[in-house]
Image (cartoon, coloured by chain):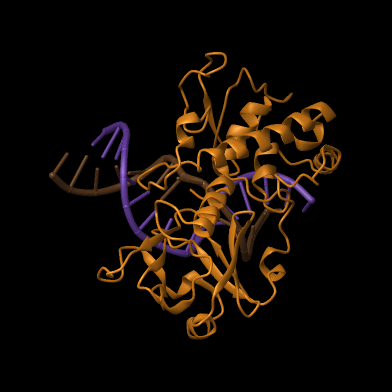
Chain colours: A orange, B purple, C brown
Amino acid sequence: MPELPEVETIARWLREGSPQGPALLGRTCQRVEVLWPRTLAAPDPITFAQRLSGQTITTIGRRGKFLRWGLTDGAVILLHLRMSGDLHWQPPPAPPSPQPHDRLVFHFADGWRLAFNDPRKFGRVWLVEDETDVLGALGPEPLDPTLSAEDFYARLQRSRTRLKPLLLDQRFLAGLGNIYTDEVLFHAGLHPLRPAHTLTRAEAERLLSAIRQVLQDGIAHHGASIDWVYRGGDFQNYFAVYRRAGQPCRRCGTPIQRLVIGQRGSHFCPHCQPPPEG
DNA sequence: CCTGAAACCTGTCTGC
DNA sequence: TGCAGACAGGTTTCAG
């Protein structure tokens, strides 16, 4: 699931508690099980377990698609769910551990456990002193009000890249993934192959507005749940183009097209999103 | 700087 | 039914 709205939803649920489980905020980690060592980007499993045991989660947040847990001693845990990662609460009494695809299990004093579950094993977790080592290259947060339309337009002007790959580039903007990029471009009325520098000032403003609108809508719906994993959100019911190839555009009726751009399936309405010249 | 391809992985679905 | 192939919400690395 994990693009900005889904990661934001998880962060809120871990902070406040949810139907899926209790709040993580304020809990003290007793021990950690490392079931698939490559899930840990840093440090090594032994050091990770030692550093974490006895520490309390004091803050929970998000940066781009990363989850961020602040610890008592000032260190930070960063989690990236990549394609198939998720966090599963397991209530006491403990079921026979581990569950299928659990890669990391955090154990708490009252018997609750939080599993980093990840069928495809692409997800990664870091424990770092200085988070800029991991987050330093990320672009701005799309929902940060200090990101101005002028700045955004200026940055588009500097790139000759096509819009689709550019919006997926986390150094340009942090948090958009394949689903939300397709939805955003539809709502902005911009073709995914448009070179960034060809956008007018008005189009750039429309694009930034669409980015913010679609992300806010996604968050309001607790993100999207697709394929076989259910994560609690229902934004998939409101997709305008994503995985709707061949179906009529909700605005004009033209069949939605699918094209592979930068190795990613891309969906758009050829009428509402006119292709660039050439 | 930019683009495309491959790699990292497992699971599901489609079509023959 | 069985099996090959396409496809999947992400990122990194390497070749050209």
Of residue A72 and residue A192, the one placed in the foreground of this image is: A72
Q: How many labels does the image show?
A: 0
Left or right, A228 with respect to A154, comes to left
Task: Please name the residue shown 48% across and 53% down the image.
Answer: A83
Residue A194 at least partly seen: no
Task: Please name the residue shown 80% across and 31% down the image.
Answer: A198
Is residue A228 depicted above or below A61 in this figure?
above
Q: Where is residue A260 in the image (x, y as percent from the top left)?
A: 55, 37
Q: Quadrant of residue A186?
A: top right
Q: Where is residue A185 in the image (x, y as percent from the top left)?
A: 64, 31
Q: Position of residue C1 (x, y in %)?
A: 13, 44
Residue A245 at least partly seen: yes
Of residue A54 and residue A268, the one placed in the foreground of this image is: A54
Q: In which quarter of the image is residue A77?
A: bottom right
Is residue A115 depicted above or below A75 in this figure?
above
Of residue A15 and residue A117, the one placed in the foreground of this image is: A15
Name the image quarter holding the C terminus of chain A: top right
Task: Please name the residue shown 38% across and 59% down the image.
Answer: A119
Q: In which quarter of the image is residue A263?
A: top right
Q: Position of residue A231 (x, y in %)?
A: 42, 48
Left or right, A60 with respect to A196, comes to left
Is residue A10 depicted above or below A196 in this figure?
below
